[in-house]
Amino acid sequence: TGTLHVVATPIGHLGDLSPRARETLAGVDAICAEDTRHTRQLLAHFGIERPLVALHQHNESAQSAQLVARLQAGESLALVSDAGTPLISDPGFRLVRAAREADIRVSPVPGACAAIAAMSVAGIASDRFTFEGFLPAKTGARRERLARLASESRTLVFYEAAHRIQETLDDCAAAFGGERHAALGRELTKLFETVLDGPLDRLRDRVAADPNQRRGEFVLIVEGAGDDADARIIEGRRLYAKLAEHLP
Ligand code: SAM
């Protein structure tokens, strides 16, 4: 049987595609990609030409059986996403699960991951963290999720898109308290890379004051709740938020 190589690609700077990732991508029979046009561009930059198979949220379950059959027939495949590490807020877990269930070797070619890159420069304790990925898009669900996280003592890691970053900072400051320390990594490894840090209320105000700080892709890192008296205040806020949902 073949091997499924799970290959991380850059989150911005193309120099971050590792030599082993290049070799692997150039050597497989086909590459499963979230967006084939996007991946074709990346491959073209490195002079790699391989057949591409679209594997995204909507066809992953259906495609997985066929791809496993190809692996069983001895083909080797690579799995990539548009940016960073596949399966991390990206498609791929169904294919990986199906391959593992079929006893196919699944091997990582590690590389860029926005969450890890952001944590490496945030200056916030990350010996224990909880990766929350994207918050719910709807206001009520997002606030409820944040309220539940308010007493979490581990560092919190969120992904966010440009059009929601301000709301998310507002909601985080409200749920966790404006004094809670946080860091915001924007456009990491790209031309306009910035990392801001400070209390949530200050971060919120800095982003509100400068439209440039709302452009691009973001990772928000929030320090965990202290295990002091704050916990009770936070619990109070959570209950209040819960109550407020039922108020007109
Ligand atoms: N699989 C990817 C990874 O390993 O990081 C994440 C994919 S997820 C669909 C895309 C989100 O990751 C963006 O909305 C943003 O929150 C974050 N992200 C990706 N690239 C980034 C970058 N260069 N700087 C900051 N955040 C980034």
Image (cartoon, grey):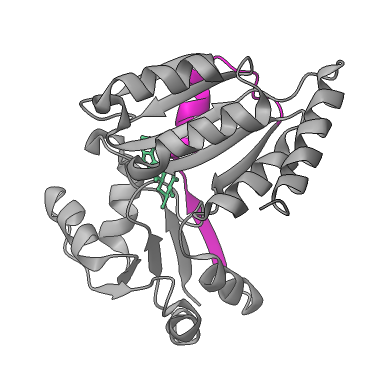
Count the labels in the image.
Answer: 0
Name the residue located 32 percent from the left edge and 42 percent from the top edge. 10
User: Can you see residue 150?
Assistant: yes
Q: Residue at x 34, y 65 (%)?
A: 34
Residue 22, percent from left and from top: 28, 49
> Residue at 30% of width from left, 75% of height from top?
53
Let me know if residue 111 appears in the view: no
| Ligand 1 - quadrant of the structure image | top left
Q: Residue furthest front?
A: 248
Q: Position of residue 221 (x, y in %)?
A: 55, 28
**Against 202, is 223 above or below?**
below
Q: State left or right for residue 14 relative to residue 86.
A: left
Q: Residue at x 48, y 42 (%)?
A: 159
Spot occupied by residue 208 in the image (x, y as percentages of width and height): 36, 24
Please, is residue 205 above or below residue 244 in the view? above
Compared to residue 45, the image places residue 107 above or below, namely below
41 relative to 104, above or below: above
| Foreground of the two, 174 or 228 | 174
Left/right placement of residue 77 relative to residue 19 reads right
Which region of the structure is painted magenta? 105-128
Residue 90 shown left or right of residue 192 in the figure: right
| Residue 234 screen position, x and y as percent | 78, 28
Residue 70 among magenta residues: no
The verdict on residue 106 being magenta is yes
Instruction: Name the residue nearer the viewer: 194 or 190.
Output: 194
Q: Is residue 4 left or right of residue 40?
A: right
